Amino acid sequence: MTATSISMNHLDYDFNLLPEYLELLFAKLRIAVVFGGDCDRAGSVIYKTHNPRSWKSYKIVAREISQALVEIGFKHVFVIPDDMNLPEQLKQKNIHLVWLNTGGVQGYNPVCHTPALLEMLGMPYIGHNPLNSSTLDNKHAFKRELQSLGIQTAPFMTWHPSQGILLPNLHDRFALTFGEYQGPFVVKPVSGRASLHVYFVDKIEGLSQAVSEVHRATHNTALIEKYLPGQEFCVAVCGYVTYANGAFSKNTKPFAFSTIERVLESEEHIFTSMDKKAITTDRGRLMGPEEPELKQELIELARKIYWEFSLNSLVRIDVRSDADGSLFVLEANPKPDLKHPEENVTSLVALGLAEYGMSYNDLILSLLADRLDYLLTQHIEIIPHIVDLLC
Ligand SMILES: Nc1ncnc2c1ncn2[C@@H]1O[C@H](COP(=O)(O)OP(=O)(O)OP(=O)(O)O)[C@@H](O)[C@H]1O
Ligand SMILES: [Mg+2]
């Protein structure tokens, strides 16, 4: 079958056609890479409110993704903020597909706003659906699901300002969660990034103040969990279609890669924010063949999470071990940093690509090709405007 014979019937799409279709799309597909709009910019929102998640535009990385798409061969790539002008911009520029590189503009659960808007507009995108975006960006919601799946995560409880001042010894929930455990703890925002407002709290007496600090900074729920004293790791995982060594493949398992130990200095309880210390190659140690079991355990864990949550796009999973070396999931980042690697500054996701014969551009192409393959296989009826480009 050739590209010209594609029809709206999903049976007509075959993975072997993907390279041919991509060739056609290079010249025709209009892609918008969307970064976080700034609510302080005039005309970006109707009323400025509050963002419980520390805001960042991610514009530089959006440009790097866009540059990679151009280098791959796409002729029409735009970089646009996700403020209230987004729908009009997408229409004006006749965009066919969006790449989400945004944490949102403002308001509660900001990571899910733009995918929700795109769902409403009928615009396909590379990124997580609204439910997964929100679940992943609310650490307590994600952890509850992990518990139901039998995936280890540190015991935790939440505390919201509306519940008053936290008095651990008086609360049943505290006793139920922690029993006789007296610390140390970690107190952090349920929705946060880059280790901002994350506190190491040695003793129970310090909890109330740390929770108040999180409330003051975020106006949102605080998470209190057991401190895991072991090593820290992360692992990236994305979909089933990959592009490596000049060829596409469709794998039976999600692609888990970049298994890295985050190198902590002595007395560095909390990994220092990447806003303060860039991710350099000495901050992330790529795991090699000397620890095959641990590496495989991380890979299996990442694949399991991808599968169980029916994820459709890249996440980076952060993991920490307890004193016995047992692995516990801290979080899965719905919009992991996709910085283009440079001399000594990189991203935790890009650090391990070479092991699989992949460049940064190969990863970008893999993410786009995986989404396209998924849409053509599962949802061809909702992307007629892309199918039209293939005829
Ligand atoms: N329960 C815990 N035990 C030990 N350390 C923890 C725990 N929770 C968080 N940390 C430390 O705090 C850091 C930030 O926590 P976490 O990954 O949950 O939040 P984040 O701010 O969203 O992180 P990121 O920088 O990955 O976006 C972790 O990298 C880890 O060093
Ligand atoms: Mg993290």
Image (cartoon, rainbow, N blue to C red):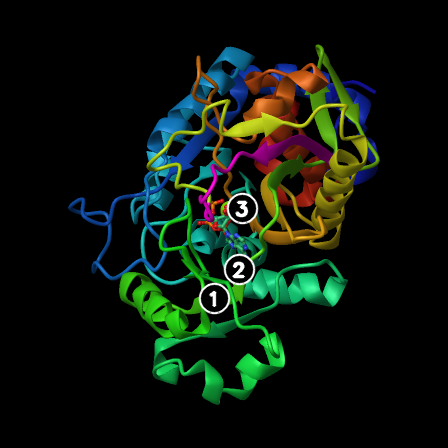
Taking 381 as reference, is 140 left or right?
left
> Looking at the picture, how far across and down is residue 201, in whole percent?
43, 62
Element type where label 3 sits in the image: strand
Element type where label 1 sits in the image: strand
Instruction: Give the residues in magenta.
Output: 254-270
Q: Which residue is mark 3?
A: 333
Instruction: Residue at 34%, 82% (x, y): give it.
Output: 165
Element type where label 2 sits in the image: helix
The residue closer to the viewer here, 361 or 163, is 163
Taking 167 as reference, is 123 left or right?
right
Amino acid carrying mark 1 in the image: Leu
The residue closer to the viewer here, 236 or 122, is 236
Amino acid carrying mark 2 in the image: Lys
The residue closer to the viewer here, 351 or 57, is 351
Is residue 4 visible to us here?
no
Q: State whether residue 136 is above or below residue 277.
A: below
| Distance (Cα) linking label 3 and label 2 | 9 Å
Q: Is the shortest distance between ligand 1 and the CB of mark 2 under 8 Å?
A: yes
| Distance (Cα) linking label 2 and label 1 | 8 Å
Q: Which residue is mark 1?
A: 223
Q: State whether residue 280 is above or below residue 139.
A: above
Q: Which residue is mark 2?
A: 139
Q: State whether residue 171 is above or below residue 191.
A: below
**The N terminus: image quadrant:** top right
Amino acid carrying mark 3 in the image: Asn
Taking 277 as reference, is 216 left or right?
left
Q: Earlier in the sequence, mark 2 or mark 1?
A: 2
Instruction: Residue at 71%, 52% (x, y): give it.
Output: 324
| Among the 4 quarters of the image, the one containing residue 367 | top right
Number of residue marks: 3
